Image (tube, grey):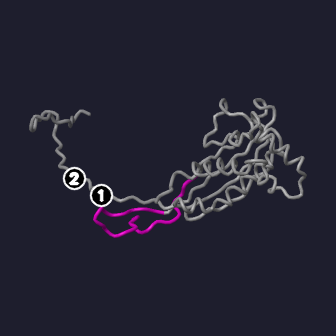
Amino acid sequence: MSAAGFFDVHCALVLQDGWAALTASDGAAFRALFPGVGDDITTEWLNELAPTVDGARNQYGLEIRTAFVPEQTTLPFIVIQYLDEPEDEAPLGYLTMSKTESGRKHGMLLRQTAQIHIMTPHPELTRCLHVSILAIMLSNRDFFVSNGYCDLEYQGGGDLQAQQDLMPEFLGAYVRTQRYTARADFDVTISTTLESHKVLVASADQVIGGTVGGVDSNT
């Protein structure tokens, strides 16, 4: 099973389902993430991030996507950015198995990195989502392992700061980032082999087998 190339997509799926689970019902799981913070404050956060629509909690109202499109995005939102994908380990000749009936199996171990950008109109909401995302990601390590990843590592979070570039559009945006890495095997079975063909080179004044040569001494 190969999970290479889809780490940001899997992160988005985990965050979407995890956020819906945190904010379900009366949001008890959400409030449990903030010990020592009064229920009035956590309720205010919850109503801002997952507002009630027609008497029901809008659990999927928070925008979580894998690409940032400014004209289609409103605060608050979460964007997962897929970063570098270096080779972490590779066998000699990228040969992972001996020749089988279906062919030779080649592969390598890739290290994938995803950076999660959190943007909201208020610093406390950004802080709140930072804690929520951290809890969702770490509590879903089994999901990543069961989908072909070798591990999931939290690489830290960035400073909580105002995003100056978005101030004119959104009249204030507060951003924080998180970075995660995960390793996954990428392997492929080569079942066909390219056959070499004869190459005929002839001058432009020759015709061989009905084909005019293409080598011109003047070019």
- Quadrant of res 36: bottom right
Instruction: Check disc 1: other Cα within 10 Å, few if <14, some if 14-19, many if 20+.
Output: few
Which residue shows up at 81% across the image and 41% down it? Answer: 47
Q: Which residue is mark 1?
A: 191
Q: Going from the N terminus, do you reach mark 1 or mark 2 first?
A: 1
**SS at badge 1:** loop
- Where residue 128 appears, as percent x and y from the top left, is 80, 49
Asked if residue 213 lies left or right of residue 98, the reply is left
In the image, what residue type sits under mark 2?
Ser
Instruction: Check disc 2: other Cα within 10 Å, few if <14, some if 14-19, many if 20+.
Output: few
In the image, what residue type sits under mark 1?
Ser
- Where residue 114 appears, as percent x and y from the top left, is 62, 52
Range shown magenta: 84-108
Q: In the image, is residue 102 part of the stretch drawn in magenta?
A: yes
For this rendering, which residue is in front, 152 or 50? 50
Which residue shows up at 75% across the image and 30% down it? Answer: 169
Asked if residue 16 lies left or right of residue 100, the reply is right
Q: Which residue is mark 2?
A: 196
- Quadrant of res 37: bottom right
Q: In the image, is residue 182 part of the stretch drawn in magenta?
A: no
- Where residue 125 appears, as percent x and y from the top left, is 81, 44
Which residue shows up at 48% across the image and 62% down it? Answer: 185
36 w.r.t. 57: above or below? below
For this rendering, which residue is in front, 134 or 112? 134
